[in-house]
Amino acid sequence: DLIQLAVQVDQAQWHQRFANFKASGNKEIILRENFGREGADLIQQLASDVGLYSKSYGKGRGTVLAVSSVPLPNYRADLDSKLQEHNNTQHVGMDRHAMAMVKDALQSLPAAPPDNTGWADENSGGG
C-alpha cells in the first residue's frame, strides 16, 4: 500500500527494512526525510510492529525520527536542530602576559582552610 505523504511511505518496504535492521544487531537508524506528521506516525507504527523503539525529535521541517533497538530518551542534543543553529560558540584565549598575571594572582591567594570550621553547624538553626 502506498500512502501519499510529504515523502511516500511504502509500508512493505519499511517493514522489511526495520525487520532487517532488527536482525542485524545495529542500534539505531536516524531518518531525516520529511515524512509529514502522518508519515512519521506510520513509520513509528511500522517500527513498533517489529519490536523496535522510535521517537520523533524536533518540530516541523526539522523533525528527525530515530528508530532504535533500545529505548530512546525524550531529548537528544545531537538531534536538536535549534541547538545546532544557536551553537555558535567562540573560544576565547588569553595572551601569555594575561595568563601569567592570572596565574600569579591565583597563586597569591591563601589556601582554602579545611571544611571543619563549624560554620555550617552554627548556621543550621540548632544553636
Image: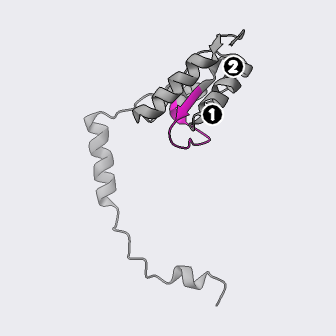
Decide: few, some or many residues near mark 1? Use Cα within 10 Å; few <14, some 14-19, many ≥20: few
Quadrant location of residue 13?
top right
Quadrant of the image containing the N terminus = top right
Judging from the image, what secondary structure is the residue with disc 2 in?
helix
Q: Which residue is mark 1?
A: 49
Inter-mark Cα distance, 2 to 1 = 15 Å
Q: Which residues are magenta?
A: 65-78
Decide: few, some or many residues near mark 2? Use Cα within 10 Å; few <14, some 14-19, many ≥20: some
Residue under the point 43% across and 82% down:
116
Quadrant of the image containing the C terminus = bottom right
Q: Earlier in the sequence, mark 2 or mark 1?
A: 2
Which amino acid does the dot numbered 2 rest on? Gly
Does residue 85 appear in the picture of this structure? Answer: no
In the image: residue 64, left or right of residue 38: left
Q: Position of residue 75 (x, y in %)?
A: 59, 39
Does residue 122 appear in the picture of this structure? Answer: yes
Residue under the point 51% across and 29% down:
19
In the image: residue 34, left or right of residue 16: right
Q: Which residue is mark 2?
A: 39
The reply to whether the magenta stretch includes residue 109 is no
Label placed on residue 80: none
Which amino acid does the dot numbered 1 rest on? Asp
Residue under the point 57% across and 34% down:
50
Q: Position of residue 117 (x, y in %)?
A: 46, 82
Front position in the image: 76 or 94: 76
Front position in the image: 24 or 113: 24
Q: Position of residue 47 (x, y in %)?
A: 59, 31
In this picture, is 81 found above or below 26? above
Judging from the image, what secondary structure is the residue with disc 1 in?
helix
In the image: residue 115, left or right of residue 37: left
